[in-house]
Amino acid sequence: MDIVNQLQRQYVDFLSSLYREGLLDDQFLQIQKLQDESNPDFVNEVVTLFFEDSEKLLHNLAIALDQQHVDYQKVDACVHQFKGSSSSIGAQRVRNICVSFRTCYDAKNLEGCLRCLQQVKDEYYLVKNKLQTLFRLEQQIVAAGGAIPIMG
Amino acid sequence: MASPLGSSMTSAKRQSALVVDDDPVTRIITRGLLNYFGFEVSTLNDGIEVVNMYEAGKGHFDLIITDMEMPVMNGIEATKKLRSLGVGCKIIGVSSCDDETSRRHFLEAGLDHLFYKPLNVTKLQSCLENN
């Protein structure tokens, strides 16, 4: 098997594992559909923006929950935005924790909010790490002269 | 892709769309979706900005897609205000609130369609084709 075939197979297996583990859902495939010759870096741009935005939101959430008098409206605004952006890129497990987070801040349950913050951070950094691996594989395929396999 | 909003579109002039959303990730994805359907796309961050634009006589879009939950002016208020200004173009709302009461309020504000997040090619295609 030549190197391109091997990398393409590796890419398909890796991406399939992300769906199987629930880290990504079909929305990610929908975003991949939008990438074409007129918009060749679309997925990378979207995901990079998601990383930048998520890290700001996680930082703001940590600060909001560290105050003596927690402003739960601020927490709501951050989690709401995180839920929207994670759902928009298909980061399913991040989105699901945002849903649980809401139950905690609606009840003004600080302990629950701190637990959800840790969970959402863990899930976010996990999906970030996997997506970075996926993009490295894409770069290797292109560098070897191959095309990125289309899934779905 | 031809004439997403009906027969008035010609190949010489692309239809224009406006995306209103405070979330930058959702905004860029919605822009990509509309580019996919052949629209020329502008973006704004909040409902108040689109209302100000139309009040100043600078809004001339064929389609508006607005988030329903925004910090300064939400999608309900913005849609009501736009309709009261006589804006007749198609307005599509996108929301993460999936209960029936919210849905009714959103549609009563004057939206043509409401989708739950996330918006994607499949959902938007059905809406544009059923026009």
Image (cartoon, rainbow, N blue to C red):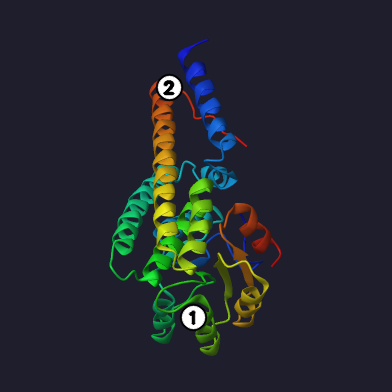
Residue at image point 62% right, 61% down: B4
Amino acid under disc 2: Gly
**Spot occupied by residue A53 in the image (x, y as percentages of width and height):** 35, 54
- Residue under label 1, please give it: B78
* Residue located 52% across and 57% down the image: A100
Pointer 2 local density, CA inside 10 Å: few below 14, some 14–19, many at least 20? few
Q: Residue A146 appears at what percent x and percent y?
A: 47, 23
Left or right, B108 with respect to A40, comes to right
Q: How many marks?
A: 2
- Nearer to the camera, B32 or B9: B32
Label 1 packing within 10 angstroms: few (<14), some (14-19), many (20+): many
Which residue does the numbered mark 2 point to in the structure image? Answer: A145
Residue placed furthest toward the right: B130
**Residue B96 percent coordinates (x, y):** 55, 64
Q: Secondary structure at mark 2?
A: loop
Q: Is residue B42 visible?
A: yes
Residue at image coords 53%, 44%: A28
- Establish if B53 lies above or below B29: below
For the point 67% across and 72% down, the residue is B100
Q: Chain of mark 1?
A: B
